[in-house]
Image (tube, rainbow, N blue to C red):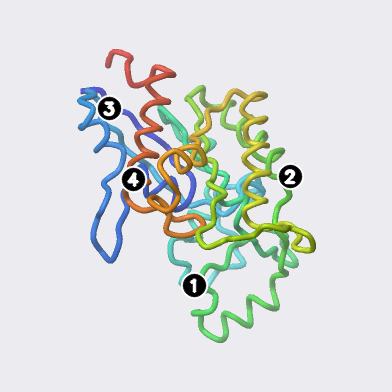
Amino acid sequence: MKRLTFFVKGNVDVRDSLHFCRIAGEVVWNGINEVLRQRQINCSVRVKHETWTRSDALLECSGTVPLAFTGRDLPLGAYSLVSQFSNAIFTTTADAIVLSIQPDVTMSLMRHRRENFLFYPSDAGTWLADDQVWLRSSYEKGGMLSVDAAMNNLAAVIARIRHHSEAPILIYNLSPVIPGEQIHCYQGLGETFSTRIRKFNLALAELSENNGISIIDVDTIVARHGADALKLDAVHLKPIGYRLLAEEVVRVLEDVGILNETAP
C-alpha cells in the first residue's frame, strides 16, 4: 500500500474534511482515508494538521514562540502558541499541502505594541483577569485583511513553499451562502460577509491562474448539493459536506497524479 503525508494548515474546513469531524464527542466523519477505502484506492494518508491564524502572521513566523508569552498559561483552545508561531509548512516534507482562505476571510488579529508580532487571543473572554489586562495593555487591535493583501500574502506563502517542495498545493475556497441571510438591497450595508467571500473566491481563481495551485471549490460543491443540506452556519458544514470535500480532494489529487503513482 502506498503511504502519503499531507501537511494541512488551516482550521475547521480542512481539519474536519481531511482529518476527522467530531460532534458532541463523537467522530461523525473520519477523514480522507474513508474516501480512499470506499474508492478502493491502494493508498493511505497521514494527515499532519496545524491551525492557522492568517497569511500575514504565517509569513512573519520564525518557528519560535515570542518571549512575551513567558510565564503565561493562556487557554487558547485549538490555537496553541506552538501552532500560531510554527513555520513548519515551509520546512516539512509532504506529498501534498492543503491550505484555506478561511483564516484570511474571517479572522482579526492583534499586534504586540513593542515586538510587533501578530497574535490571535482565542477564547480571551475566558482568561484570568490578569491575563486580560495584559492583553489590553500589550496588544492593539488590527483590522481585517483586504483581498489584495491576502492574495499577495498567499502568493508569498506559495513561493516560500516552492523553495522547499514541489508537492501539489491545494487551497479551499468558501461558500458565500449564509444560512438565514435574505439581503436584497446592499445600499448602506458596506461589505457583507457573503460579499467578502465572493471577492476572495474570485481573487483565489486569479491566484490559481498565476501560480498553478489547485482550488478545492467549496462554493461549487455546496451549490451543487444544496446549502440547506450541507451548511450549519457561515463556515461549518454537516458531516456529509465534509465527506464531499474529502472526495473532491481525492479527485484533484488523482488528477495531478500523486495517488496513482507506483509506490516505491
The x and y percentages for residue 40 are: 20, 25
- Measured in 3D between alpha carbons, the distance from the residue under mark 3 to the one under mark 2, in whole angstroms, is 36 Å
Mark 1 Cα shell of 10 Å, populated few (<14), some (14-19), many (≥20):
some
Q: Position of residue 92 (x, y in %)?
A: 46, 35
From the viewer's perspective, tell me whether residue 38 is left or right of residue 92.
left
Q: Residues within 10 Å of mark 4 (few under 14, many from 20)?
A: many
Residue linked to disc 4: 19
Disc on res. 149: 2
In this view, 55 is above or below 210: below
Label 1 sits on residue: 74
For badge 3, the amino acid type reads Arg
- At x 33% / y 45%, what residue is drawn? 19
Figure check: 92 above or below 114: above
Position of the C terminus by quadrant = top left
- Tell which tag, 3 or 2, sits nearer the viewer: 2
**Residue 25 position by quadrant:** bottom left
User: In whole angstroms, how far apart are the C-alphas of marks 4 and 3?
Assistant: 15 Å
